[in-house]
Amino acid sequence: MELRPLGKTGLRVSAMSLGAMTFGESATFMKGVTSPDEEARAVLDAALEAGVNLIDTANVYSEGRSEELLGLWLEGRREEVVLASKCRFPIGFGTRKVGPHDHGLSRKHILKACEDSLRRLRTDYIDLYQVHMQDGSVPIEETLRALDDLVTSGKVRYIGCSNYTGYRLVESLWAADRQRTHSYASVQLQWSLVTRDAEREVIPACKRFGLGTLVWSPLARGFLSGKYKRGQAPPPGSRLEAWKDSMKSLDNDRNWAVLARCEAIAAAHDSTAGSVALAWLLARSEVSSIILGVRDRAQLADNLRGAALKLSAEELKSLSDVSAPDWGYPYNFIGVREAW
Ligand SMILES: NC(=O)c1ccc[n+]([C@@H]2O[C@H](COP(=O)([O-])OP(=O)(O)OC[C@H]3O[C@@H](n4cnc5c(N)ncnc54)[C@H](OP(=O)(O)O)[C@@H]3O)[C@@H](O)[C@H]2O)c1
């Protein structure tokens, strides 16, 4: 497995990493679409065996159970992995009353959430601690100071963010500079052939300021795997059968055309649509690691094939062309003259 630098840090992360959002039985947003524990453990073992060294979880995945299972299953091999977790959202949202400090990016919540994650993960430190989404109600200085304290106290090695706007990301970099605190080393963002919005602001910002990028939902929640067919009901038990709103927003001419192009290119390589979609991402120099989300070992094996698939320049261009959104203003204005 290829190793890539995570931004400007000394970390070397596998080009494909494993997301643990499918670990543990969930009562909230992943209800019914996670893996049985035995299968999740086998997926973890197989991923590590294949050379994956970055594991991504969050305090909210299966209401903390994802972290607990990782804590159990990584015993004895903790040092082998770059363990990433997140805070920001309230655990069990929608199923319980949430207090004002049970979520958000205040100093109070971050320090408590980190202690809780460390306990569930059965570890003394988290390699990459990420804020799960920006929080406009808290001064960025407060958030950064709290994260900095976690780094200096040894509970966290690096800090990162996820789901940030371009302006808030750059504001955070300025604030860290001004305060001389540790700064975000990476951004975790949604990116795939059918969701390219981050290419407008956040990805160019990562490139310019040397932040690593970790890609979530690289298959658009499974849409790009090829198992969904236009005009047909989603396979029973699949994520997009359960997540009807997501399927509705994916079900449009452009996205089916993107999938058809992936399938055509896959046929020429005796591969799968999903592998082609992942190979397109891996070909982007900005990508540090693609976080795979899988339900079982067969999906993992299928997706890992994308790491070995080398697409030609024409194939990459044809995928970029068919998936290009209307970038809008000022990107179209700038784009005819130079890269933005
Ligand atoms: N920072 C954030 O806000 C954020 C948000 C979301 C995810 N993440 C991270 O990113 C990771 C990946 O996200 P994701 O799970 O949405 O990724 P994804 O790759 O877009 O979707 C994964 C789902 O697609 C289906 N699938 C995957 N490979 C397949 C294959 N080869 N054949 C058929 N179906 C396949 C499976 O669902 P079914 O079998 O159930 O249909 C699987 O659970 C998560 O685990 C998490 O660590 C972060």
Image (cartoon, rainbow, N blue to C red):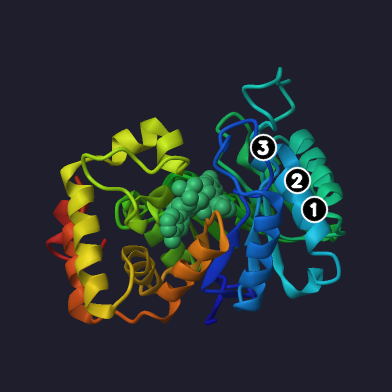
Q: Are marks 2 and 1 in contact (CB under 8 Å)?
A: yes
Q: Point out the tag, 1 or 3, that comes first from the N-terminus.
A: 3
Query: Of helix, strand and loop, which one carries label 1?
Result: helix
Q: Is residue 128 above or below residue 244?
A: below
Furthest-front residue in this view: 236
Query: For the residues marked 2 and 1, what is the alpha-carbon distance in whole angstroms?
Result: 7 Å
Q: Residue at x 21, y 39 (%)?
A: 231
Q: Is residue 113 left or right of residue 326?
A: right
Residue type at mark 3? Leu
Marks counted in the figure total 3
Dot 2 corresponds to which residue?
146
Provide residue 146's location: percent of width, then percent of height.
Answer: 75, 45
Residue 26 sits in quarter: top right
- The residue singled out by tag 3 in the image is 105
Q: Is mark 1 within 8 Å of ligand 1?
A: no
From the image, which quarter does the N terminus lie in? bottom right
Q: Nearer the viewer, mark 2 or mark 3?
A: 3
The local secondary structure at tag 3 comes to: loop
Q: Reading the chain from its start, which is encountered first: label 2 or label 3?
A: 3
Depth check: give the residue in front, 196 or 217.
217
Q: Where 28 sits versus 87, above or below? A: above
Does residue 122 appear to the left or right of 128 in the view shown? right
| Distance in Å between CA atoms under marks 2 and 3 | 9 Å
Q: Is ligand 1 within 8 Å of the beta carbon of the residue shown at mark 3?
A: no
Can residue 140 be seen?
Answer: yes
Crowd band around label 2 with a 10 angstrom C-alpha radius: few (<14), some (14–19), many (20+) = some
Contact, CB < 8 Å: mark 2 with mark 3? yes
Cα–Cα span, label 1 and label 3: 13 Å
Residue under numbered circle 1: 150
Considering depth in this image, is 228 or 178 the residue closer to the camera?
A: 228
